[in-house]
């Protein structure tokens, strides 16, 4: 039976050359910013970019920066922008976007594998869907769309729901990865990291509902 949101578990791959980490994360986002190579200032820039993407611009100055951020994401891909968030805490908005970006990148890198693991996880672990709080987790294509919506600067009405759905997907795929494992030790470690990501996204969703995700 086809999985909603995932048309086929084929081996179509996306060009992975876009998924490198730049040597100077995010420098073109805030070009000319004094001390742009300072890690603390890059973290501050990353937090501001995350806020603008998710919350929208508050004034004309914010709007100008937000336009530059979205333009960077559209023209150069998300790697450079997302690298601004790599060291942010998991319970921050920037750290949450980093984890959403990692999940998106993994799906784009090998959608066939992601689809197969999702199908396997859905088959053997419906309880994880309930634990995640999402009865019908999104499929592979939907996860890409969910992440793209947030990371490309489209302000979402309910970020908490988006994060919960992404977390549910991560949990199901983690189970499927363990079930299909050709290298059990490595697959177990990888699946465990996915579960941790799911837990972090779920916590971020709770913080968002409480108005504390910043």
Image (spheres, helix red, strand yellow):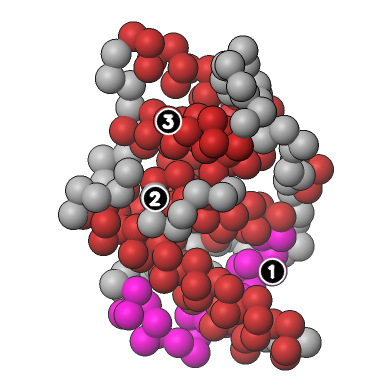
Residue sitting nearer the eye, 62 or 176: 62
Q: Which mark is residue 113?
A: 1
Q: Which mark is residue 161?
A: none
User: x, y (%) of residue 37?
Assistant: 66, 28
Q: Where does the magenta region start and end? A: 110-132
> Eyeballing the image, is 199 above or below 184?
above
> Eyeballing the image, is 15 above or below 66?
below
Mark pair 2, 1: CA separation: 30 Å
Whether residue 61 appears in magenta in the rendering, the answer is no
Query: Going from the N terminus, do you reach mark 2 or mark 1 first?
Result: 2
Per the image, the residue denoted by label 2 is 92
Mark pair 3, 2: CA separation: 12 Å
User: Mark 2 or 1, which is nearer the eye?
Assistant: 2
Residue at x 52% of width, y 24% of height = 69
Residue at x 34% of width, y 9% of height = 60
Relative to 88, is 129 on the left or the right?
Answer: left
Residue that lies at the very extreme toward the top in this rendered image: 60
Per the image, the residue denoted by label 3 is 48
> Eyeballing the image, is 7 above or below 192?
above
């Amino acid at each position: 039976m086809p999985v909603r949101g995932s048309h086929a578990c084929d081996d179509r791959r996306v060009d992975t050359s876009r998924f490198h980490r730049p040597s100077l994360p995010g420098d073109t986002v805030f070009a000319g910013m004094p001390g742009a190579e300072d890690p603390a200032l890059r973290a501050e820039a990353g937090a501001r970019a995350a806020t603008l993407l998710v919350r929208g611009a508050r004034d004309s100055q914010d709007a100008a920066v937000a336009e530059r951020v979205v333009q960077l994401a559209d023209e150069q891909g998300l790697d450079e922008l997302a690298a601004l968030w790599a060291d942010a805490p998991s319970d921050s908005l920037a750290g949450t976007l980093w984890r959403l970006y990692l999940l998106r990148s993994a799906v784009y890198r090998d959608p066939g594998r992601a689809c197969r693991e999702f199908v396997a996880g859905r088959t053997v672990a419906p309880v994880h869907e309930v634990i995640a709080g999402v009865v019908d987790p999104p499929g592979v294509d939907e996860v890409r769309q969910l992440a793209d919506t947030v990371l490309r600067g489209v302000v979402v009405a309910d970020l908490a729901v988006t994060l919960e759905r992404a977390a549910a997907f991560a949990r199901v795929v983690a189970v499927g990865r363990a079930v299909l494992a050709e290298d059990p030790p490595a697959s177990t470690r990888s699946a465990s990291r996915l579960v941790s990501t799911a837990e972090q996204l779920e916590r971020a969703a709770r913080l968002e509902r409480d108005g504390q995700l910043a």
